[in-house]
Amino acid sequence: MKQFNNIYNMNMKHIWIRRLSVFGLMFLSTFFASIKWMISLPTDASLWLRVLMISLFILTFAWISLFFWSSVFGFIELLRRRKVPGIKWVSSQTALKHKIALLMPIYNENPESVFANLLAMAHDLEKTGQSSSFDIFVLSDTTKADVWIAEEALWMEAQKHMPDSIHLYYRRRARNIARKSGNIEDFCIKWGALYESMLVLDADSLMSGTTILTMAQLMEANTQAGIIQAPPMMVNSKTLFSRIQQFAGKIYGPIVSAGLAYWQVGDSNYWGHNAIIRVKAFMECCGLPILPGKAPFGGMILSHDFVEAALIRRGGWSAWLLPELKGSFEECPPTLIDYAIRDRRWCQGNMQHMKILISKKLHPISRVHFTIGIMSYLASPIWLCFLIVGLIIALGREFFPPVYFSDVRTLFPMWPIFDKIGTISLLFLSLFMLVFPKFLGLFIAIRDEQGKHKIQKTVDLAKSVVAEIVLSALIAPIMMMFQSRFVFEIFTGHTVAWNTQQRDNLQTDLQTAVRCHWVHTVLGILTLLIVVLYVRPLFWWMLPITMGLILSIPISVITSKTDIGIWAKKQRFFIIPEEIHIPDVIKKARRYVQILEPATKKNYGVDSVVTNNELNAVHLMLLSVNGPKPDTTFEQLQNAQMKLENYLNYHVPMQMTNEEKIALLYDEEILIKSLIISKINAH
Amino acid sequence: MVALTIQSADDIVGAYLQTFGFSKTKAKEQAPVLRKQLKLDDAIGDNLVLHLNKHLAKKASDLFPDIKGTEEERAAFIKMAYLRANGSELWGIDFWLGKNKTMEDILIQKALIAIPSPCIGLMKPQPIEVPHASSFFMRIRQLFERKK
């Protein structure tokens, strides 16, 4: 095991200089800002409040300065158009020697878009002339019976449109042990040995053929590479919320990725999808254990991607984030609430990493990845505490007048010192560090803008950046409240269920918004009242936070609207170049959605398995690759059978529970006979 | 599923053939022929379907030695290939009755392979040695004790 040795074509000194520059500047700026903060705090505040305030400031400032300096170095890299060093690039004509598997793990997803994306990728790969090196696997963990049947139907339908050179395989696990990581592990155990690498996708992933081929070629050329991650770009957004996220990802994403790649080099992270992984490395290093203790900190590892990257790195393989790899796409949750629901899951996964962070033998940079992941959620409660303590100090000054003469007799009075200018300058510095990287991203976006009407496009980009800053400032306190609650829930032992991510553009209705945000609104109003009544000087400083919270309900509803998203697009806000010059693979995916649409309109369910010849046959033949039957009771099967008989003989609509449907769908004899009966009854 | 037993054997075989894409008329015509050819005169109700599927499962195993599963699953596998090849039009009930090289080639070509043959590998759970809280504090204590 070549643990932590130089496994890339680069001088280790240069790598550590990169790291030292980013983290050194982070520490230096945090140090000086903290000193300034220390002397700016009111001297009449109690000591423990000041200590708490300084500690919270250090954590918050360190967090934003890491983001700032990483972005600055990312900007410099993009400005110089430098590729990530240490990895060997090859010609696009290089022939692949090994087979590569494209894995699409799914769990109760919309099968129409899953298969449309796969068909688009397959046809884009075919254009490269090397498509015969690729096989596609749809690895289903679906538990909803109707979705399961729809997947089988669309798999069958998609076969008609697949290029001959690519196999489209499908298997469903009846028991989804260890969720997504278990799903991939199951693939590796059964078929991993047949493939050199596997490209892991997500249900909404879409990658161009050339990008997939480049990643496979890089994997073959860099034999020590364990993971190559292509940063995914958000596309296909319709609601205002997702369009803002998509725009932010397009403009700021490149400098963030370039910044991360600058200091991570070959010790990068893995984001769970749109990445190619060497199967041998994965099988050697990534069998995930069950963590000791109870959930949410113990038990099954939830956010497996970070852990897998750390284990692969521990095993002596390198992991790369390559911002040069374009043509990697994903979708964004459509609404603020959906975004928060996803964050709840991710939050728990990242908090669980606290346990792994201190485990033995990990590469130091892997520990940094875990820390960043943890901090991305802990930052919210820290910021919240910072605001609360700040407010308490301000209120203290209001309610407890300064003591000029203490019990000990002194010659001069003790004047309370509060460096107002210092505090304001630090606040502006923090704001600058948060906002400035956005303008760096804007600069790169303008530079890279191609085609006609460059001035118009520059104006559009600039006004969209300003609008994004305003809207994200309003959304930030809402997310702070959400994430603080999530962290609190996790620390008090509340776990999260494995739910499918909402990807369809379903808007947030007022009732849902009120249910999710009423606490935010009440807290916003209370804070504003306290500030207006007792600490009026803080009014303007607190306004962005209180406004965001007070308006959380309308913000959530309005940003979830598709028509407002379209309106913003018409006003030329939040437009990304990929919406003007649509990449081929996205066009293809949209076309295949239309092609598959008639098949999906059939509304698949148990009834279609007992009436449709093809679906009955495909379902029965796929049972053999499903693995052992899940536990269902005799009673469930009996109920299902009774409902089925009523449906076939008397056309009584089947109203089965999911468990009844599953029980029935595993009974081959009943399914065969039912199909025959449906033909007899049709006479 | 009592409904099957009250049908005549030809009706059942006819309906069975319809599940293979035969039209209602053609299925009605071919059902007695198939029953006679496969010597299923004595079989009734459930047994008829069982026999027909057994026959198919055997055919599937001969043609696709790699496929696994129960008789019903193997029968469904070859049935799928038959349906995709529009076998009811091309070969009718000859599919059950005899061997035909061209038919076999087309069936092989039209077969839907759900998964490749497994090539089992090993993936051991990797140790993640999480220090126990008590041992963590113990170590810090030891560090101080050593310094003293």
Image (cartoon, rainbow, N blue to C red):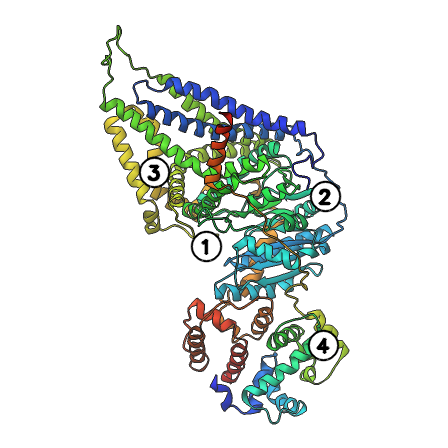
State the CA–CA distance, disc 1 to disc 3: 27 Å
x, y (%) of residue A132?
72, 56
Q: How many C-alpha atoms fall within 10 Å of the one at disc 2: few (<14), some, or many (≥20)?
A: some
Cα–Cα span, label 4 and label 2: 42 Å
Q: Provide the secondary structure element on which disc 3 rests.
A: helix
Chain for numbered disc 4: B
Q: What is the chain letter for disc 1?
A: A
**Can I make out residue A228 in this image?**
yes
Q: Amino acid at mark 1?
A: Asn
Residue A295 numbered tag? none
| Type of the residue with mark 4 | Asp
Q: Secondary structure at mark 2?
A: loop
Q: Position of residue B19 (x, y in %)?
A: 58, 79
Mark sitting on residue B62: 4
Horizontal side of residue A585 vs A58, given as left or right: right
Mark 3 and mark 2 on one chain: yes
Callout 1–callout 4 Cβ contact below 8 Å: no
Question: Marks 4 and 3, how far apart in space?
Answer: 69 Å
Q: Secondary structure at mark 4?
A: helix
Check disc 1 and report its element: helix, strand or loop. loop
Q: Nearer the viewer, mark 3 or mark 2?
A: 2
Nearest-to-viewer mark from 4 and 3: 4
